[in-house]
Amino acid sequence: MIRAFLLLLALATPLAAETRPEGLMWNRSGLPLTLPLQVQSDPGADLYLELSVPETGEAVLAAYVRGGDFFRVLVPPGRWALTFARGTGWQGEEALFGPATEVIAIEPPLTFAAEAARKSGFLIDLRGGTAALRGIGLCQGMVLDPASLSGAFVPQPEPRFATPPKRDAGGVDFAVPRYDLRARFCVSQD
């Protein structure tokens, strides 16, 4: 009798929304997440993003975007099909947002790649009921470490095949400039 009551109670209760995730949910690509993807969305509806292999449909990455919030995720290199599910009342990866789930497929598949000094990705703007796409990148460059020019020579452990220390004409050791690799967002030239 108690079991029957609990079963009726469970059936009478509407499906409760699950806790809303945030950001990267999983990566099954086996590749490092190094390339930028940024999504802009309207407040009021969340997005579930899935990257998949275009030829097979195999999902390789999933992320959750809270509607209206700034969202950026790093994705693996490759050519990926991007599909968004949009809605309210998250019910998990199987049911997504329930029967009212809206599906948005970005066509054609997008290629995320790295070049010598640039990691190329995309900005997808889903605001206002349309999908606009723009190339973005992480541009990398060398920046001089000013402390390395202080004039004081600080001996470093030398590798086995190191070049001799730098000396001026009088035979005095001098500082060798050091550089750091820095990255910044840059707009695509496409």
Image: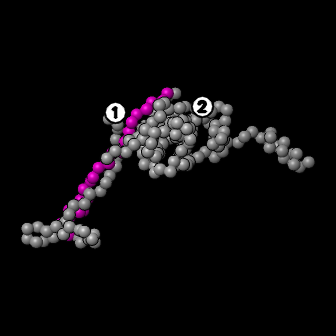
Picture coordinates of residue 31, whole percent (x, y): 47, 50
- Residue 6: image location, x then y, percent: 84, 47
Label 2: few (<14), some (14–19) or many (≥20) C-alpha neighbours in 10 Å? few
Q: Given the current orientation, which residue lies at the most extreme right position? A: 1
Q: Out of 55 and 62, give the one closest to the viewer.
A: 55
The answer to if 147 sits in the magenta stretch is yes
State the residue in front, 90 or 138: 138
Seen at 48% across and 30% down, the residue is: 107
Residue wearing tag 2: 102
Please give the range of residues in magenta: 130-153
User: Residue 40's mark?
Assistant: none
In percent of the image, x 38 and y 39: which residue is there? 136
Q: Tell me residue 29's x, y (percent).
A: 51, 48
Q: Which residue is mark 1?
A: 190
Dot 2 falls on a residue whose secondary structure is: strand
Mark 2 or mark 1, whichever is nearer to me: 1
Residue 43 appearing in the image: no
The quadrant where residue 164 appears:
bottom left
Of callouts 2 and 1, the N-terminal one: 2
Asked if the residue at tag 1 contacts the one at tag 2, i.e. Cβ–Cβ closer than 8 Å, the answer is: no
Amino acid type of the residue tagged 2 in the rendering: Glu
Q: Check residue 46 for magenta coloring.
A: no
Q: Amino acid at mark 1?
A: Asp
Question: Looking at the image, can residue 97 be seen?
Answer: yes
> Residue 11, how many percent across, how many down?
80, 40
Q: Quadrant of residue 171?
A: bottom left
The residues bearing labels 2 and 1 have C-alpha atoms spaced at a distance of 30 Å
77 or 133, which is in the foreground? 77
- Looking at the image, residue 97 sits to the left or right of residue 126; the answer is right
Residue 13 position by quadrant: top right
Residue that lies at the very extreme toward the front in this rendered image? 55
